[in-house]
Amino acid sequence: MLDYDKPMEREPQEDAIAIERLVTDAYAVISGPAGTPRDWAAMRAMYWSGARMTAIRPDGTESCTVEEYIATKRDFLTDRGFSESALVNRIEVFGAVAHAWSSYAGDWSEADGTRGATRGINSFQFRRDATGEWRIHSLLWQVETPTLPLPADMEPRP
């Protein structure tokens, strides 16, 4: 069992690398061309049981478990194709808790063939599991709007 009061015997940079990889994997598991099934088992393995995923949009808030996300987004992601990736990640670690502030860009195909696009910020909260590995505890995101653009430090640098 992991002793949460003691720091792990690894370099802080190792934690940041592991979390960066987990963020990349979280984007990759929901991304892919139309007609390509997603690896839902891999997605489930990234998240703690009971993890919440919450979107804040101009028209309201939507919150769900990972299973509810899969059930409601599966057809859209695979039928239309969807791709999302990080623009800038800021990672902080304290003991068994970590946070990644991750700006993102995504796109998909609308039913009429036109392209849809989105950007925003994902706030990932992580904690170590009993083996010392990082898993996503919760994910909260807000989409960019004309009146709420990404902060300058979360924009990709040329």
Image: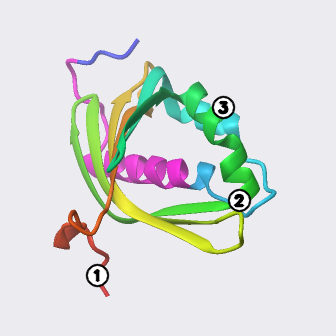
Q: Earlier in the sequence, mark 2 or mark 3?
A: 3
Q: Secondary structure at mark 1?
A: loop
Highlighted magenta segment, given as a residue range? 5-27
Q: Amino acid at mark 3?
A: Ala
Q: Contact (CB < 8 A) between labels 1 and 2?
A: no
Residue visible at 36% across and 17% down? Answer: 2
81 magenta-colored: no
Using a 10 Å C-alpha cutoff, classify the residue at mark 3 as few (fewer than 14 neighbours), some (14 to 19) or many (20 or more).
few
Checking the image for residue 157, the label placed there is: 1
Q: Earlier in the sequence, mark 1 or mark 2?
A: 2
Q: Position of residue 151 (x, y in %)?
A: 18, 67
Residue visible at 21% across and 66% down? Answer: 147
Residue visible at 68% across and 37% down? Answer: 40
Query: Given the current orientation, which residue lies at the most extreme right position?
Result: 35
How far separated are the C-alphas under marks 3 and 1?
Answer: 36 Å
Q: Amino acid at mark 2?
A: Arg
- Which dot, 1 or 2, sits closer to the camera? 2
Magenta-highlighted stretch: main secondary structure? Answer: helix
Disc 2 designates what residue?
80
Using a 10 Å C-alpha cutoff, classify the residue at mark 2 as few (fewer than 14 neighbours), some (14 to 19) or many (20 or more).
some
Q: Earlier in the sequence, mark 3 or mark 1?
A: 3
